[in-house]
């Protein structure tokens, strides 16, 4: 079946500004050949340490960044170049709802402006549309006249979700969308996202450093390390049988489902994307590294049916 959304061999390079006396400008490759597919109604989780490229990938996925190379496909076709009118295909729920909202605009203006600009609603129908989306995300429509600073963190996150959904996307990228909330509010927002997915047939790319949350919400999980996907499988399979030593270390170093302390810590810091290690980028931190690891980069390949891993272990 054709995926709803697809990234093919995405590369994202940034040139760091030249600083006098510090040599030539540096090029940073944040994403290195990323392939991802999200099916209709599917939730794909994306995990990895801070700085691995998750947020860059989120911005590429919704079109806020143009990739340096590779393709972004919608139902097998390149994304339309001009997406300013009509329903948006993809939208983002940002990590920091406070920063994502304009402090000078009321909640109602922020939820309604996108739909108005895209011609999805006439000016006369804007307030009714705003009230409808506020109710759907569990907000009192009376808050439409409020400014973001007058709301709680949970309410601001609901406004960001309503603003995203008011332009009728079918694909939502949630970049640590619930990370700043306390646990009970986080659970409410996750339940809201699950209800909206069921009701509207949405697909999600759910990005988080919190493995327990990703396990709870995702049907499949991709693991990212230094700009590459190193493992991908159905959620139950990945958590029961992680193949890649990085995934194994990440799982061992994460708190238990009951909030208990992790069994081990993940040794060392991720290497700089300005100077990535040769071969397998994980080799300086890998307890299983052997002589082939620094010399050749392992391709992402099927280690078991539907289970991809990029590791030399067990390969001829
Ligand atoms: Fe470790 Fe080598 Fe596998 Fe990389 S390829 S994860 S260094 S065993």
Image (cartoon, helix red, strand yellow):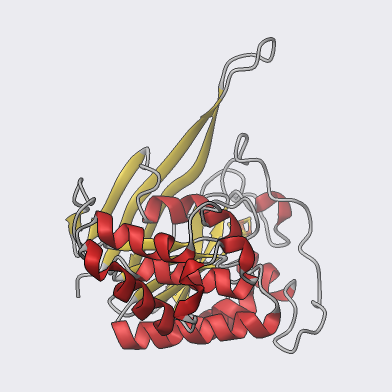
Would residue 237 be visible to someone looking at this image? no
Q: Is residue 204 above or below residue 183?
A: above
Indicate left or right for 113 with 258 as reference: left
Indicate left or right for 117 with 33 as reference: left
Indicate left or right for 176 with 165 as reference: right
Quadrant position of the N terminus in the picture: bottom left
- Depth order, front residue of 61/196: 196
Q: Is residue 53 above or below residue 314?
A: above
- Which residue is located at x 55 percent, y 62 percent? 147
Can you give x and y, in whole percent of width and height, for residue 57 in the image?
46, 53
Can you give x and y, in whole percent of width and height, for residue 141 in the image?
45, 79
Which residue reaches farthest top?
A: 21
- Depth order, front residue of 306/35: 35
Can you give x and y, in whole percent of width and height, for residue 274 in the image?
61, 34
- Depth order, front residue of 282/210: 210
Where ligand 1 lies, by image quadrant?
Answer: bottom right
Residue 128 falls in image quadrant: bottom left
Residue 173 falls in image quadrant: bottom left
- Which residue is located at x 51 percent, y 60 percent? 94
- Which residue is located at x 59 percent, y 72 percent? 178
- Which residue is located at x 48 percent, y 65 percent? 107
Indicate left or right for 186 with 264 as reference: left
Can you give x and y, in whole percent of width and height, for residue 2 in the image?
20, 70
- Depth order, front residue of 9/187: 187
Would residue 137 be visible to someone looking at this image? yes
């Amino acid at each position: 079946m054709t995926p709803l959304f697809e990234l093919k061999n995405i590369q994202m390079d940034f040139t760091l500004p030249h600083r006098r006396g510090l040599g030539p400008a540096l090029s940073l490759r944040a994403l290195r050949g990323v392939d991802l597919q999200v099916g209709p109604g599917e939730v794909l989780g994306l995990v990895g340490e801070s700085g691995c490229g998750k947020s860059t990938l989120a911005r590429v996925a919704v079109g806020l960044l143009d990739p340096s190379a590779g393709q972004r496909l919608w139902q097998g076709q390149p994304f339309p170049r001009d997406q300013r009118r009509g329903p948006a295909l993809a939208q983002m729920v940002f990590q920091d709802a406070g920063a994502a909202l304009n402090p000078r605009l009321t909640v109602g203006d922020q939820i309604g402006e996108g739909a108005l600009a895209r011609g999805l609603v006439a000016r006369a129908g804007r307030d009714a549309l705003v009230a409808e989306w506020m109710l759907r995300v569990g907000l009192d429509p009376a808050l439409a006249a409020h400014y973001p600073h007058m709301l709680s963190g949970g309410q601001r996150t609901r406004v960001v979700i309503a603003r995203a959904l008011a332009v009728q996307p079918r694909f939502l990228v949630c970049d640590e969308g619930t990370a700043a909330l306390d646990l009970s509010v986080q659970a409410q927002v996750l339940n809201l996202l699950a209800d909206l997915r069921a009701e509207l047939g949405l697909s999600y790319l759910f990005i988080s450093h919190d493995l327990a949350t990703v396990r709870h919400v995702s049907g499949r999980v991709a693991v990212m390390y230094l700009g590459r996907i190193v493992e991908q499988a159905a959620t139950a399979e990945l958590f029961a049988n992680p193949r890649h030593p990085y995934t194994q270390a990440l799982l061992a170093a994460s708190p238990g489902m009951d909030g208990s302390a992790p069994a081990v810590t993940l040794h060392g810091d991720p290497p700089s994307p300005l100077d990535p290690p040769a071969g397998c980028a994980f080799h300086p931190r890998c307890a299983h590294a052997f002589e082939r690891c620094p010399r050749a980069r392992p391709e992402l390949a099927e280690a078991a049916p539907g289970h991809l891993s990029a590791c030399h272990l067990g390969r001829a």
